[in-house]
Image (spheres, grey):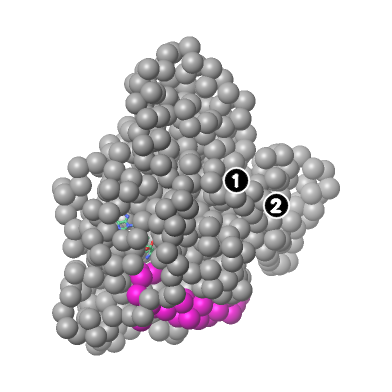
Amino acid sequence: MTAEKIMKAPQRAARRRVAPEDIFIDRRYIEDLLEEARYADDGSISAYLDKAERFEGLNHREIAALLVSQNPEHLERIFSIAWKIKQRIYGNRIVMFAPLYVSDHCVNRCAYCSYNCDHEFGRRKLSQDEVREEVKILEQMGHKRIALEAGEHDGECPIDYILECMRTIYDMKFENGEIRRINVNIAATTVENYRKLREVGIGTYILFQETYHEPTYDRVHISGPKKDYGWHLTAFDRAHEAGIDDVGGGVLFGLADPYFEVLGLMIHNEHLEEKFNVGFHTISVPRLCPASGMNIADFPNLIDDAVFEKLVAIIRIAVPFTGMILSTRENRRMRQKLLHLGISQISAGSKTEVGGYAQRWRPEGTNAQPEHRKQANPQFFVNDERSALEIISELMDDGYIPSFCTACYRNGRTGDRFMSLAKSGQIKNVCLPNALMTLCEYSMDYGDENFRKKAAVLIDREVPGIANEKIRGRAAENIEKIRSRGERDFFV
Ligand code: SAM
């Protein structure tokens, strides 16, 4: 670190040392599970698959056996059960969101990340006016749900800055609506800071463990506060302590053995279920991609598409009631495939650099201030560059219902309240009408004539599928009001 950087190094938020007994991932236990799994016979694996097919989820030993199995017949069944679960629990709805990067200042030295503090580039954080400009563009794309993203830097990007951004975003109202849910993906922090995030109205707190394999974690997190495995691992415990009951986990596939990672995720989920009565609200499945300042060839554990598909399907059948998120790290073909295997939420039209939506960093950009005429530094290079409208339109062609619903969070259906509704199957009575009403809004406000026609056919075809008669009637009425009277923001 240069002298100047050391001078600017931020004060760390008050941290607690995590006691060894609070680290709930036991590496030897996972390694033993994977070793034993090599001896699982076909009969046992078929029985595990029968169990998954009854939507009963899977225990560690069963998950390990499916991960390790190389039998193509088992794989075929895993895929078909994943699809069955997806249809039964999530129907054909796909929730839409977009990321909003507000700051790329970072004090960590993470080998895989372009925000690595050794990587020299013109770092920035958005002013509140710039936040407004980005949000305006996101709104013009039809987004109602965003994931707010930032590097870790308590000096340049303290919690108060994140809270200010959230307030700015929630205060913005447009003719067609507003951002109604802000999920937040910022570094592991203190109970006190999580409490502040909750007070401002955080949706889901998202944090990827990156890797559950501690030696790998230690190797790829070269220095900085993120190097503390225990602190990072127990972030959701502190979030829950602060009253945030919707948390979203994930690993960065490509750092360590992917089978180890899936078991790590499952054990983490169970730890939260046991301690707080509710596990992950969502699981994200990011795969390591090329980014500036890192060389992807330095990572020996990259996973190919076939392994990735298998992991996604196994997670789907192991935890049927947990939403699964896929970003634009994956290309169009892969996204189509994984939607079939269990993904229930995707991003669209994403920009992964700070100020990316307004392209403020472009020298030729009309609104580029001289201090902003720097090179863009996306956190990773996206592999699905289609516009949100193109993605949403293609989802409908493929038989899905793109959903802009944010109702659960706004109706207080979070944490275990959400999970019990999901497990009883009743969630369908709210998700389907909300998806159809928000898609109707989207089509009226952002679609061209063709899109509107296509959406109308889909919506009219799906409304009769709402099981509860009263809700069906109300949804039909509201859809009519959206179409003919320009009314907005209905939800149940
Ligand atoms: N600062 C927060 C933290 O420490 O968790 C947020 C991190 S960042 C905004 C969001 C995620 O991007 C990271 O958790 C990491 O998994 C992912 N990421 C970083 N570099 C990546 C790369 N080269 N390819 C794909 N994903 C990457």
Residue 129 in sight in this render: yes
On residue 274, the disc is: 1
Which of the 4 quarters of the picture holds residue 7?
A: bottom left
Image check: 323 left or right of 298? right
Residue 428 on the magenta span: no
Residue 5, position as x, y percentages in the image? 22, 81
Q: Are marks 1 and 2 in contact (CB under 8 Å)?
A: no
Q: Quadrant of the N terminus?
A: bottom left
Q: Which residues are magenta?
A: 148-176
Residue 282, position as x, y percentages in the image? 52, 50
| Number of numbered labels in the structure image | 2
Image check: 301 left or right of 348? left
On residue 417, the disc is: 2
Residue 269, position as x, y percentages in the image? 52, 45
Crowd band around label 1 with a 10 angstrom C-alpha radius: few (<14), some (14–19), many (20+):
few
Say what secondary structure mark 1 lies in.
Answer: helix
Q: Is residue 476 above or below residue 223?
A: above
Residue 440 in sight in this render: no
Q: Residue at x 42, y 45 (%)?
A: 25
Q: Residue furthest right?
A: 470
Q: Is residue 472 above or below residue 361?
A: above
